[in-house]
Structure formats: structure tokens, C-alpha cells
Amino acid sequence: MNAKIRVVRVLAGFVLALGFVEGAAAQTLKLPPHEKVVLKNGLTVLLMEKHGVPMIDVAAIVKAGSV
């Protein structure tokens, strides 16, 4: 559950950053659809493609702690 909240926060930050880049005159922000894939080992991969932007951003959240 905590990892999902972090993923949502990262995506929200991405959306806010895009909003500031678009400029103050922009009233709507259109994001491309995203794909969610859960691998056999439990890793969740979120992929959001926008081919007009030459940028790759990778973020990883690892569950770790003491027993």
C-alpha cells in the first residue's frame, strides 16, 4: 500500500512539473495513457509514452526494512 502511495505521489509530481512547463496560459493538461504491468516477481511497471519528448525518466521504489 505504501509503495502505491509513493507511485501516485511521483506521478502527481510529474503532472505538476509538466503543468509548470506548459506555462501559466495553459488551462488543461493532456497526458498520454499509461500502461501498468505486474511482472511474475511482483514488480509493478508503469509506462507512459510521449514520443514528442526526447526524455526518459526512471524511478524505483524498493520495499526494505527490518524484520
Image (spheres, rainbow, N blue to C red):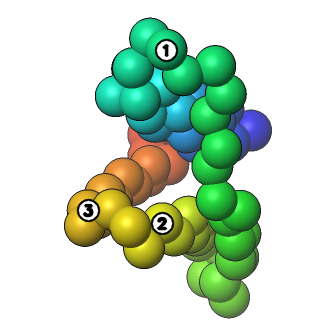
Outermost residue, bottom direction? 40
CA–CA distance between discs 2 and 3? 9 Å
Query: In percent of the image, x 71 and y 69: which residue is there?
Result: 36
Give the vertical position of 62 relative to 7 (above or below). below
> x and y percent of residue 1 in the render?
74, 38
Q: Secondary structure at mark 3?
A: loop
Tag in front: 1 or 3: 1
Q: Amino acid at mark 3?
A: Met
Quarter of the view holding residue 44: bottom right
Give the vertical position of 8 relative to 34 (above or below). above
Q: Nearer the viewer, residue 37 or 16?
A: 16
Pointer 1 and pointer 3: residues touching (CB < 8 Å)?
A: no
Residue occupied by mark 3: 55
Quarter of the view holding residue 26: top right
Give whichever of discs 2 and 3 has the lower sequence position.
2
Q: Amino acid at mark 2?
A: Lys
Outermost residue, front direction? 25
Give whichever of discs 1 and 3 has the lower sequence position.
1
Residue occupied by mark 1: 25
